[in-house]
Structures are given as C-alpha cells and as structure tokens.
Image (cartoon, grey):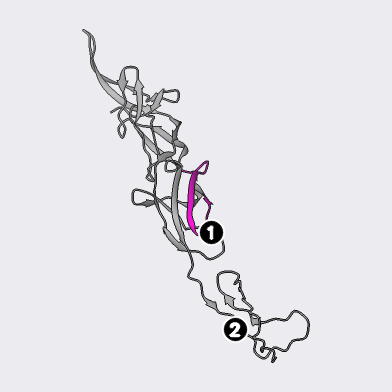
Amino acid sequence: DLHSTSRRQRQMCIRDSNYTGTVEVPWSITAKDMTNADATVAGGNVYTGENIEPEITIKDGSKKLVKGTDYDVAYSNNTNAGTANADITFKGNYSGSIQKTFEIARKNVSANIEFTKTFTYTGVAIEPTVVLKDGETVIPESEYNVSYESNTNAGTGKIIVTDNNGGNYEVNRIEETFTIEKAEGKATAPTAIENIVYNGNEQVLVNAGLSSTGEMLSLIHISEPTRPEPIS
C-alpha cells in the first residue's frame, strides 16, 4: 500500500567509460483525494429498533473501494425513523472525507392489541387500557390514538385505534369491541307508615325505598275502608 506523501528511494547505476558508481533518487506518491467521490448508500431502510447501517458503494473509476481498507464509515442518528448520517473517511491510497445522508422509513404494522374485554356498568364512561405490540415489542402509546364509542351503558362498547403522525411506526387502524354487563341492583323495599290519621289533605303513606342502580318507583293500591252496615 502507498500512503499519503509516502517516500521511496531507488538506486540508479551509472555506467560510463569515464565514470562508475550509483546515485539514489527519492520520489513520493501522494494518496488520491476522494473529497468529490461519488458514494451510493443503499436504500429501502425501515425502522427495526436497532442501528441501521446500509451498504455503501464507492468507486475509483471502475474499481470498487473496500470498506476497512480504503475507507471507514461512522454512522449517526441511525436508529429512529428520519434522516441518518454516514461519515466516510478515506485511508490507505486515498484521502479526504465525505458525509452522506439516508432515510429510515417508519415501520407499517398491523399491531396485536391487548385489553380487558368485559366490564360491569358503573354509570360513567368505561375506557379499557389498550396495549399494542409489534410481535413481542410493546409499541409506545405516543405512536397511536385511542377513542371509544358506546362505552357508558350496558351493552357493547367500541375501541378505535388510529395512527399518530410521526414516530417510528405507522399503525394501521384497529376496531375492537368489549362488553359492559348490567350491574346487580341492590334495593331496600319501601315500608308503610303506620297510624296515619285523616286530616283532609294528601299525606305520605310509605317510607321511600332505596336503590343502588337507579330510581325506585312505588305503586300503592289503596282500598276503601270497610264500613259497617246500617241497622234497620
């Protein structure tokens, strides 16, 4: 290998009818400057959660340069989706440095969804906690939006998951349902008020009952009092 401004010496023999001897003539070979080299970075890079280090092709004419021999590469910002850098430093028979950029695309994923599927009516909106996974990898909550429909009353509620712009994932839309079961009611029956004396006005006849799940309605049947038969 010839290195930048490396020096060599060569002995030259002088042969003449009048002279004899040798002389050393030094010379140097300078490494080729590759500052304007055309370097191609392989495309099709998609987020994996790991560092992305695509293959780089550099040529000197028709000669393909060898990584590690003719140049070294240092990558940066090369994990998340977005623009990454490749810093190329030449060595050996070549000198100079160049920087190339390349894109890392978001990963499109039809995620697996995990959530509790059955709840009991509470009178307030029920919003099941959702976990999305790409294989065994949990997808951060910042990567998607969750909304709910029909999620208060007993019946069938709906979960809707949509993509959140940006990030490392492109999450495909998900729609799932869950069940809200009726709550078991607890009630205390109304009781009659005893010893009511007629006063010509409307009076409360019973003590109201209590219900844990709603309003209790009382149906009261009033029968006419038994009157004594007249004596003839």
Label 2: which residue?
A: 191
Mark 2 lies on a secondary structure that is: strand
Relative to the observer, which residue lies in front, 174 or 194?
Answer: 194
Decide whether residue 151 is among the magenta residues.
yes
Label for residue 153?
Answer: 1
Tell me, yes or no, if residue 5 can be seen here: no
Boundaries of the magenta span: 147-168
**Amino acid type at image mark 1:** Asn
Report the label total. 2
Q: Mark 1 packing: few (<14 Cα in 10 Å), some, or many (20+)?
A: some
Query: Which labelled disc corresponds to residue 137?
Result: none
Residue 63 located within the stretch drawn in magenta? no
Quarter of the figure with the C terminus: bottom right
**In front: 139, or 13?**
139
Q: Where is residue 141 in the image (x, y as percent from the top left)?
A: 48, 52
Q: In what element is the residue under mark 1?
A: loop
Q: How crowded is mark 2: few (under 14 residues within 10 Å), some or many (20 or more)?
A: few
The reply to whether residue 145 is in sight is yes
